[in-house]
Image: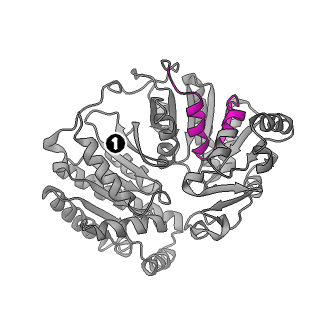
Amino acid sequence: MIGVVADDITGAGDIGIMFAKADWETHVYPLRDAAEASGRAGARPDVLIIDTNSRLDRPEEAYAKAYEATKRLVEAGCGTFYNKTCSVFRGNVGAEFDAMLDALGASFALVVLGFPKTGRTTLGGIHYVRGARLEESEFRHDPVHPMNRSDLVGILQAQTARKVDRIDIGVVEEGSEALRRAIAERKAACGYLIVDVRDQASLRIIAEAAKDEPVLCGSSALAEELAALNRADAPALGTFPLAADAGTPRPPDPARAGRGSVLCAAGSLMPQTAAQTRYLREKGVPAIELDSLLLLDPKRSAEHLREVADEAARRLEAGEDVLVFASNRQEKIAETKRLALLQGMDNTEVSRVVSEALSETVRAVCGRTGQRHLVVAGGETSAAVCGKLGISAFRIRKEIEPGLPSCESLEPGRRLFVLKSGSFGGEDFLWKAMEHLKKEGGRT
């Protein structure tokens, strides 16, 4: 069984679909359930992913979570381990990589960050996003983790005491045997070895060279090629306990499904999500703004949340799709940050306030309407929504776009949903995801 530690819930889905589309049964659990599920019994997956929800934590907190998650995967009987990080190294990558190696008593991990299908490539150790150096991409302006350098060795070395080295694209393009020899030669002298990626062919070569490596780190892209090399055709071997009802998908209840409509909640401030919400509005989907300035006003925030929830519920009960989105115009974002600073909050705290408000709105709307088809944009928002709705575990279903799957909750009363990383997906992705859920929701 393959064990994965992911630092946020959308990343868990991102890597999960890489295995699921190659016929690997793939399940995702939050860390809190991984620790509390010792009495459960049920079906056993081929791939077990634990979401630590640690990207916004302090490094020492992220380390502790990744360490515990890795230990849980060892107890489950996993033999190969994957530390899934953001495809541009946002978050606590050094602390979490160290935690996995420490928990395993291991000294080396291969690191592959390139994800060509989403425009992420690494050449000469420099990471690019759709042709622009990482430090010149939209991630330079990330409100929580601004990326102001592009050299991956330097980014990772600043976060770990283990030596970081790299392998150039020229070695990769000599073929898998040459790359395997290079890895064997370098691994004794470093803790992490970062490998360049030009395109999907690079990933195929890396997968062939690294298929026997026990510890891998980075984006989800390499997992797609590894899964294709080792397509699951045997029963799962792991012993990790799952929810008692995990083996039998439940058909949706038409009387409680929001009449086939879909609720979309967007909390990400990435430009990709802003373009996707704009596309929905242009398609005529009713859009309700969750005003970030009102959320910071203690006299008005509760009333504003009620008004947004009331309007969303009314629309859904009328059979309409609905978009609820956090303020994403740059001038309002800047004013929100200014006001938050006056209240003693940093950008991370503001992000959590908005995610909490949006997730509470979704919970209220779903409680009133019985809505079971959801699309959520933003990693922090996705984690908050799942927490509010009691979605503690889910199965990866079908790929909609690279790294973006639909999912199915494993608890009684099935929900079908899509959790989207803020920076992933084409302009029409939210629309495609909503249409996908309508189609899948009609299947038994």
In the rendered image, the vertical position of residue 36 relative to residue 371, given as above or below:
above
Residue at screen point 74% across, 47% down: 194
Q: Is residue 297 left or right of residue 80?
A: left
In the rendered image, the vertical position of residue 157 relative to residue 4, given as above or below:
below
Secondary structure of the residue carrying tag 1 is: loop
**Quarter holding residue 257:** top left
Q: How many marks?
A: 1
Within 10 Å of the Cα at label 1, are there few (<14), some (14-19), or many (20+) other Cα atoms? few
Seen from the viewer's position, the closer of residues 198 and 275 is: 198
Residue at screen point 39% across, 57% down: 429
Q: Which residues are magenta?
A: 206-233
In the rendered image, the vertical position of residue 96 relative to residue 177, given as above or below:
below
Q: Position of residue 428 (x, y in %)?
A: 38, 61
Residue 226 included in the magenta stretch of the image:
yes
Q: Is residue 41 left or right of residue 362?
A: right
Q: How is the image coloured?
A: one colour
In the rendered image, the vertical position of residue 410 relative to residue 427, given as above or below:
above
